[in-house]
Image: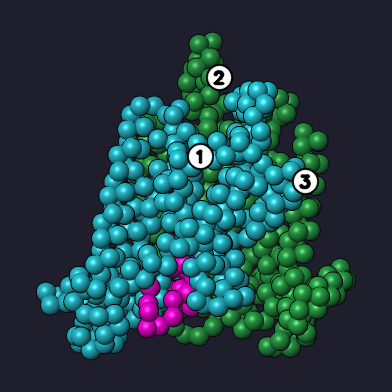
Amino acid sequence: MTRASVSLRPSTRSLHAILRVVGWIGLGLIAVAVSLSDFLASAPADATGIGPLLAAPSAALRFGSDMLGRDMLSETLHGLSATVRAALPATLVTLVAGALFGFVAARLPRPLAEALRGIGGILASLPALLLAVLFIGLTARGWAGVAAGLSAAPFAFVRAFERAREQERATHSEYARATGISAATLLRRDLVYEFSDSILSSAARALAAVSIVLSTVSFLGFGAVPPHRDLGLMIAASKLYFLHAWWTAAFPALALTVLILFARLAAGLDEGERA
Amino acid sequence: MLRFVVREAARTGLSLLGAALLAAAISALAAPHAGDGTWSFLVAWGRTLDAFVHLDFGRSSISGGAALDELGAHLPLTLGLVAEGFAVALIVGIPVGFLFGAGPARRAAAPLIQIVSAAPIFCAGLALAYVAANLLHWPVPLDNGITSGLVLLPRTVRAFEIALLPVLTVGLAGAAAAQLALRRGGAAGTAQPWRTQLHRMGLPVWEIETVYGVPRILGGLLSGLGEVMLALLSAAAVAEWVFNYAGAADLFVKSVALHDWAIVAPILLSFAGLTLVADFIGRCAARPLADPGVRQ
């Protein structure tokens, strides 16, 4: 249960709890599908000529085939695997550079903390998508995961910073300071309390955010490099054909939407909270 | 209230200054010898900052045109798209936010809204294009080269059909952000003690909601104006890419790909400026709604 949901009515709280469990079960199933993608997929990644070109879904090819005759079911599984594998390190980057660093930054000496908060605010005033594109342009496409994580970090940084400031003003902090507990000890205790309570929720929230950014930068041509296609690149490749072959875009888009949905549900977002 | 506005204005001004420093650092990458070392980069950064002060944003390394001219040629399309998308966002987002922002509907709608808003905006754009092309038989500009002339005020049905898809794509992204902000405002007011106390004083529920509840929900939308602008700008980048329109967001993506940093910098600065100004206006406008004492 997140702290914000404590004030919710019991029925709303139980609905939140159910949705979070659904989200984690969904993410667990996706993790299994990703781990076993080479086994579950009937064709290896990027294997062309498996079926006729642009064949509609049928008993033989359940998700149909694309413009190079690739089996869309196998490709969607491989694409999901590529997206999740890139999103996991990106999630870690967001957690460390955003949530953790934001919390610690708020307890630094006031001028330094305010300067860092200002930098975080400026970066958060840019769309995460364009920030990720910029980071990739400044480095290389191989760094897309880190770039997606860094682009989602400013928002997480600002949120964690404000949360830490809130805790600094809380009664327990006043008592702790009055009883002589050092600032470092108080920070360590607050960090443990904060992260043991919300690490899973923060990770799921970051996973949802970086999955959107990663797939969109791939869609724009800045992410995955062929032949290692992720879901964004698969959807981009289908752009010229999907108006008369809907399955080339629909199944990768559905897989991506399901991944983001489960991550959001697992995060247990409160009313009006963004991922 | 005046103190609040001055403080917020100072904060916004500092953030704009920071955004200008960031943009100048990026633009400095285009300077010759900027990559020779830290000192060379700092010198190039200083020179670029000096040029920025004189409104000289450099020249494109691809087209050779002045960066400001390139921005002037592409930004109006993006601004028009954002403005019309904002109108759609308000038309769609406000009723949805109010409908699902209060009462028992809020709890029932929460999972449904999660499902609908989980689709990334480029998937939503392509879905709209599919529906328009196959069900409505509208012209969909997906694969007929770059178009620079999106008619944002269409006079014919055909021009309206062409303009509607990118505007709807941007508008839906904005609507998602707007309803989120409204529901946040609604949720924040639900647990407030004044609601019960006003009811005990004999005020009917509808009066409490309309006189005290609605301004706070609207305050939620206004204080989230910066977030709505971010969603609109992100969606504009995707819509311009999907529907092949040569706006500033599309120019940003292509300029980064070509390492044309002199073009990237002013676009970045203008987008940051738009978000920061929207955030400032929203916060100032939300203040009297959140605190009726200020309104008086």
- The percent coordinates of residue A98 (x first, y second) are 57, 53
Circle 2 is placed at which residue position? B194
In 3D space, how far apart are the residues under numbered discs 2 and 1 (Cα atoms)? 35 Å
- Give the residues in magenta: A211-231
Q: Which quadrant holds residue A252?
A: bottom left
Q: Is residue B93 above or below residue A258?
A: above
- The percent coordinates of residue A16 (x first, y second) are 35, 38
Say what amino acid the circle numbered 2 marks. Answer: Trp
**Depth order, front residue of B174/B39:** B39
Kindly state the secondary structure of the residue where label 3 is placed. Answer: helix
Circle 1 is placed at which residue position? A192
- The verdict on a common chain for dots 3 and 2 is no
Evaluate whether residue B152 shows in this view. Answer: no
Asked if disc 2 and disc 1 are in contact, CB closer than 8 Å, the reply is no
**Depth order, front residue of B294/A252:** A252
Label 3: chain letter:
A
Queried whether the magenta region covers residue A185, the answer comes back as no
Left or right of B84 on screen, residue A2: left
Instruction: Please tell me how crowded label 3 is: few (under 14), some (14-19), or many (20+) other residues with Cα within 10 Å.
Output: few
User: Color used for chain A?
Assistant: cyan
Chain that is green in the image: B
Label 1: chain letter:
A
Circle 3 is placed at which residue position? A111
Question: In this rendering, which labeled residue sits more in front, label 1 or label 3?
Answer: 1
Q: Is residue B251 above or below residue A262?
A: below
Left or right of A1 on screen, residue B226: right
